[in-house]
Amino acid sequence: MKEKIKIFLDSDLLEKYLLGATNDMESMQVERYIAMYPEVKKTYDELQDNLENYAKLHAIKTPEGLKEKIHARIKSERSGRKQFFRYAIAASIVACMFASASYFFYNQNQSLQQENSIVTNKIKTLEADMKQQLEDVRNQFIVLNNPQTKKYNVRGNKMAKDLKAVAYINPVKKLSYINVSKLPKLPEDQCYQMWAEVNGEMLNLGIIQEAASKDKLTALPYSDNAVSYITIEPKGGNVSPTTNKIVANIAY
Amino acid sequence: MSALLEKHIVELLQERNEKAISLLYEHYGDTLYGVAYKVVRNSDLAQDVLQESFVKIWKKSDTYDASKAKLFTWLFRITRNTAIDKLRSVNTKTDKEIQIDVSDVYNLGVESIKPDLIDVRENLDKIEDKYQIVLEALFFQGMTQQEASEELDIPLGTIKSRLKIGLRELKKIYNPSILLALVLNIVL
């Protein structure tokens, strides 16, 4: 250990450190030695004293006015700092404003995006609806325009004498439509409902709204030897047809 | 420098009280100016160096660590390094300007010296030149022992021993002057 200290003291690391000429690595090494070995610490303290004494021997009276210049420099340094703080405060305010503006725009953007997706969905739904309707119209056209389409005039029985409807059946394309053009008035608590018997099963085709169905072709499920019925049912429709209230039937 | 005053100055520095600069200038100004002058060998440059050093001291005051160095050591390091940097920047700017006659420099130094320091300066002359040259090279010229050995054409071992002896001699001449000051204080 003694040998290690001697080698260290013989090197000029301690002197270099004293003068502030060591690099970071060397400084750390020297500081470690000073902390660990009292002998090194003692030498370092002596060197510090000697340096101070030696430097004092070379003291030269400072020129007049130098002190004032230094004070002026320090003052400007301070005001520079103050200015810096002023800028820092201004910058913080700007940053806060920027942050709140960002937050505002972020929110706005978020709600716009939501709106946008709603609109897009609506457009998609509309598109699908339109396609569906177009498809319906196309099918209707095909049925109506096809030479093999048969047209049946449907009339009501004695319970609804004025009922007039036209059914279009195309056995080749397996499509059938009905257009109810006239329905006799019913009491407030009753309505007309349409049914179709397909392969022995009774299907509910829904309530006929007179006004809406006047110019509308309603699709009927196609099947060979199917029968469609129109019945009078309590308002709001029924789950199965009331057989004694059949006002018209269409067999195809 | 009394330890108490040193502590007071350090406290003021860490409080960022400008009074610290006044006290530092009062107590160390001449010595640090001497250090700067020794390195740059020109009074205008030395004044610049001292100004810059004080600004650095002020800016770095919170980095001073009393456990690592005495206040003067810290001040000396800043001043010496500032002076060496200054000399390098001037040297690279104008190589010619730096060729100042050495005799001028020494005259200037002697003229502006504090009267109460003349005694020690005379004492300093008592240290043999061979020690002084080594001390100057190491303390003021910014040389390492290795560089001083090459520059002065003296073996490294001799540099080391001369440094140690030179410092010992220095202690001898410096201590009596303190003693003398103390005696004078008591008598007066």
Image: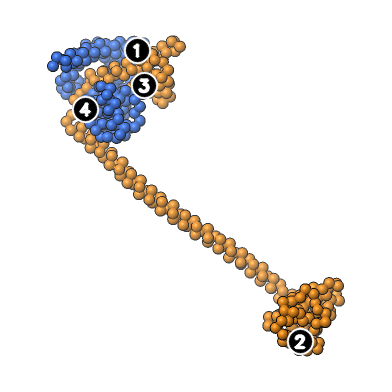
Disc 2: which residue = A163
Instruction: Tell me which colouring the rendered structure shows.
Output: by chain
Look at discs 2 and 3 and give the one toward the viewer: 2
Dot 3: element: helix
Disc 1: which residue = B160
Nearest the camera: A159 or B175? A159
Q: Position of residue B38 (x, y in %)?
A: 25, 23
At label 2, which amino acid type do we have? Leu
Dot 1: element: helix
- Give me the C-alpha separation between circle 1 and circle 4: 34 Å
- Give me the C-alpha separation between circle 2 and circle 4: 122 Å
Tell whether A218 sits left or right of A15.
right
Disc 4: which residue = B26
- Chain of the residue that carries numbered disc 4 in the rendered image: B
Chain A as rendered: colour:
orange
- Give me the C-alpha separation between circle 3 and circle 1: 15 Å
Q: Which label's residue is closer to the chain start, 1 or 4?
A: 4
Vertical comparison of A104 with A71: above or below: below
Nearest the camera: A154 or A230? A230
Q: Which mark is residue A17?
A: 3
Q: Which label's residue is closer to the chain start, 2 or 3?
A: 3
Which chain is blue in the picture?
B
